[in-house]
Image (cartoon, grey):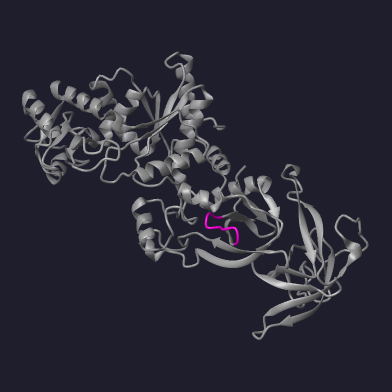
Amino acid sequence: MENRNFIRTIIEEDLRTGKHAFPITRFPPEPNGFLHLGHARAILMNYHLAIEYGGYFNLRFDDTNPVKEDLIFVEGMKEDIAWLGCDWKNVLFASDYFEEMYQRAMLLVTKGLAYVCDLTPDEIKDYRGDLTSPGKDSPYRNRSIDENTALFAAMRNGEFKDGEKVLRAKIDMASPNMNLRDPIIYRIQRAYHHNTKNQWCIYPMYDFAHPLEDAIEGITHSLCSLEFEDHRPIYDWFVKHCEMPKVPRQIEFGKLIIANQITGKRHIRKLVEDGVVEGWDDPRLITLSGLRRRGIPPKAIENFIKALGLPKSQGETEIEMFYEYVRDYLSVEARRIHGVIDPIKVVITNYPENHVESLEAPFHRDNEALGTRTVNFGKVLYIEREDFIETKPNKKWKRLSLGEEVRLMHAYFIKAMQVIYDDNGEVLEVHCTYDDKTKSGSGFNDRKPNGTIHFVEASTAQEVEIRLFENLLLEENDRNAPIEERLNPNSKVVRKGYIEGNVKPKSSEAFQFTRLGYFALDQDSKEDNLVFNRVVELKSSYKIKK
């Protein structure tokens, strides 16, 4: 990571003092949904900090709740993280350690630091108290070690019903930190687990499992978001009293929150089920799979994360700031071609019938490495409807109008002479003449055209479907209102347009359509029906702070 940050300072001090030879980090998602842009900070941060200082990065799935987890999420997360360019050393699962976790929990029992409790969930909540009053001891808190040992073993053996008993740590019911008020360690839950199948009927709670996983793997710096700061004392308590031989350090940072975007799994699932979006990879979502499908380059995400750094505090970031980093990257790396979204025909009346001319043009005038392509020119062309108006309204109008001459990019000067309308009074065709002495690259500079516009030659053009996306949520609506009341009815608009006939897009490749924006090939594309998603518009009013 390029920015200096407090976590980097901690790592450097640990290496300087010899506490660690190198850092070992991890990204530990629960496989119960799909990753989104907010997760990218933790993924990229953990990966780059480990690699930069000669260490390594693990991918570990915290699969301790089989009711909500599924292999489809495991595979989806692996695909997303690999797409970001983060190479893990090991793929691990919390469930790999279930036996050791059970034995460590039994150690707490034999030390008198854990007990089996028969209170219901509601009773446990009532006994816990609140921030202004201490909790009350469970009536089962003083069970003997022998009784707790037998009961916990019986829980494992399936001798009790789901929810009938739990194992709790015995810490301090009067602690000002609610997490230390005898937290639940294990619950009974009969559910099929994607990894361990039906081997277990008890599962560890996250606050117990997570620090043990870190310690077992030898994680040196356990980096997590700020919401876990109050959990650090219980993290350290379990590592200490479970007598873990390796001691990780938990360090918190500010979570990346993107304003006015939907990231909650429950909300996205409902949108999918209701048909509002077309899946977890819908390009209007900021899930990593949605961003990938939309055509967002992973390097642009990395640049965005690096620019934000690693703050200790937490705050919202506007999606337009992210889009500006996408534009910044694509402006250099994307091939540029001509595309027309709202076409009208231009007929060159003095150009030969049935003749198509091939003109050479660069894919990017400032990036020669992207090569060149052949642009076709013929008697019938398509231009953008907004690039023509019958009567020039003022001196600032630098496009095509009757009696005015414009330059066709990479081709010739043309002059509009006549307009043909359809039955609805809409412009159907514009008849123009061209000057064959004004071919691009000929050095012709005798007169100055009224601007430059792009075009697509009609007979060789590829007809394409173009999907234009806006924010899924309306910005002006009350953010506290239900999501269904904030949905943007125009978040997706589908158009039919044209692109140059000689361009052969690669899978998911992003292009700049001249003067229109950045567009990427969608997975719905077929050889005879190309589909493009608008990645971002060409310009934004958002300014990156220097």
- Measured from the top left, where is residue 440 in percent x and y? 85, 58
Is residue 535 visible in this depiction of the protein? yes
Q: Is residue 331 left or right of residue 412?
A: left
Q: Is residue 227 above or below residue 437?
A: above
Q: Residue 73 occupies which quadrant of the picture?
A: top left
Q: Is residue 337 left or right of residue 317?
A: right
What quarter of the picture does the N terminus occupy?
A: top right
What quarter of the picture does the C terminus occupy?
A: top right
Magenta portion: prevailing SS class: loop
Name the residue located 47 percent from the left edge and 42 percent from the top edge. Answer: 80
Q: Is residue 413 above or below residue 239?
A: below
Name the residue located 13 percent from the left edge and 21 percent from the top edge. Answer: 110
Q: Is residue 525 magenta?
A: yes
Q: Is residue 130 left or right of residue 364?
A: left
Q: Is residue 6 left or right of residue 108?
A: right
- Measured from the top left, where is residue 224 in percent x and y? 39, 34
Name the residue located 46 percent from the left edge and 60 percent from the top edge. Answer: 472
Q: Residue 206 occupies which quadrant of the picture?
A: top left
Q: Is residue 242 above or below residue 294?
A: above
Q: Residue 143 occupies which quadrant of the picture?
A: top left
Q: Which residues are magenta?
A: 522-528
Q: Is residue 403 magenta?
A: no
- Measured from the top left, where is residue 496 in percent x and y? 60, 67
- From the viewer's side, name the closer residue of 475 and 110: 110
- Measured from the top left, where is residue 112 in percent x and y? 13, 23
- From the viewer's side, name the closer residue of 505 and 485: 505
